[in-house]
């Protein structure tokens, strides 16, 4: 559901289809972990006064977002989202505007979404639940591994490109120069850049070292406004 919300929002605002999030499939783990954290806390605080219950739950998604941003940056050396331009942000990892969005989603999740989904999950039957959970978990793991490799390849390309620029060189694709098709090294950048346009900031300082026709194609795919145009 988080994937649907975010992908729809970005597709509308950017005027083209965007598969939002870290993974290739229809998942954005931060929403899932946030919902699980809310479910666990709601049960732990079931007998607590509302003045404790709701404030704790409302700030939980913001905490999950901050921790996720920190851990992903440490793991990949990349800032996957950045709220620096938003008012009242904390180190660009969280900001007041999106914390308000998370607060609204928290209330909707606890009041409506979770009860609705749990009732339908229980109706599936024990064996169906087990096999479906196993299949989805296996797919999730495979998707995570593949998407992690995409980010690692992106980071490696950026490091190599910066080293090339420091030596005064430029990026020359090894194949398909005459066909004007994007070389394999550049194609690997598309998924991370589409999912996290803030990564353009990692690429921007070295753009002059990339042939203009490649940069133009990337701009048409990712969106020129992310390249400062």
Image (tube, helix red, strand yellow):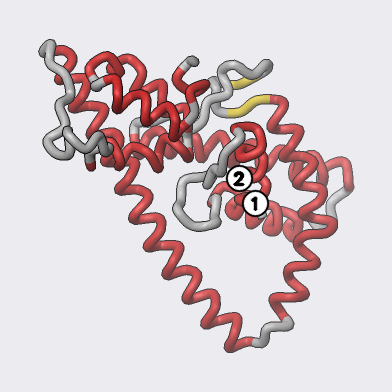
**Can you identify the residue that label 2 sits on?**
7
Q: Quadrant of residue 193?
A: top left
Q: Are marks 2 and 1 in contact (CB under 8 Å)?
A: yes
188 left or right, relative to 84: left
Q: Quadrant of residue 146?
A: bottom left
Quadrant containing the N terminus is bottom right
Q: Residue at x 54, y 55 (%)?
A: 27
The extreme front residue here reads 178
Q: Residue at x 23, y 32 (%)?
A: 157
Marking on residue 4: 1
208 left or right, relative to 18: left
Q: Nearer the viewer, residue 225 or 115?
A: 225
Q: Nearer the viewer, residue 52 or 195?
A: 195
Q: Secondary structure at mark 2?
A: helix
Q: Residues within 10 Å of mark 2 (few under 14, many from 20)?
A: many
Q: How many marks?
A: 2
Q: Position of residue 100 (x, y in %)?
A: 76, 33
Q: Looking at the picture, does residue 69 appear above or below residue 229?
A: below
Q: Secondary structure at mark 1?
A: helix
Marking on residue 134: none
How many angstroms separate mark 2 from mark 1 (CA)?
5 Å
Q: Looking at the picture, does residue 139 appear above or below residue 10?
A: below
Q: Position of residue 205 (x, y in %)?
A: 32, 14
Q: Residue at x 74, y 68 (%)?
A: 117
Q: Residue at x 24, y 21 (%)?
A: 211
């Amino acid at each position: 559901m988080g994937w649907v919300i975010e992908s729809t929002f970005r597709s509308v605002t950017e005027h083209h289809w965007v598969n939002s999030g870290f993974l290739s499939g229809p998942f954005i783990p931060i929403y899932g972990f946030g919902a699980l954290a809310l479910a666990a806390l709601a049960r732990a605080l079931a007998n607590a006064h509302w003045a404790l219950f709701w404030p704790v739950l409302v700030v939980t998604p913001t905490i999950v977002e901050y921790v996720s941003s920190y851990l992903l940056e440490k793991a990949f050396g990349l800032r996957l989202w950045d709220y620096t331009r938003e008012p009242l942000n904390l180190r660009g990892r969280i900001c007041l505007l999106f914390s308000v969005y998370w607060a609204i989603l928290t209330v909707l999740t606890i009041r409506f979404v979770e009860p609705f989904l749990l009732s339908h999950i229980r109706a599936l039957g024990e064996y169906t639940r087990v096999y479906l959970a196993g299949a989805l978990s296996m797919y999730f793991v495979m998707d995570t591994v593949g998407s992690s490799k995409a980010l690692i390849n992106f980071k490696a390309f950026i490091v190599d490109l910066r080293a090339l620029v420091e030596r005064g060189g430029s990026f020359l694709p090894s194949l398909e120069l005459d066909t004007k098709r994007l070389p394999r090294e550049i194609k690997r950048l598309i998924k991370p850049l589409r999912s996290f346009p803030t990564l353009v900031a990692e690429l921007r300082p070295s753009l002059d070292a990339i042939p203009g026709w490649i940069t133009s194609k990337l701009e048409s795919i990712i969106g020129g406004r992310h390249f400062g145009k």
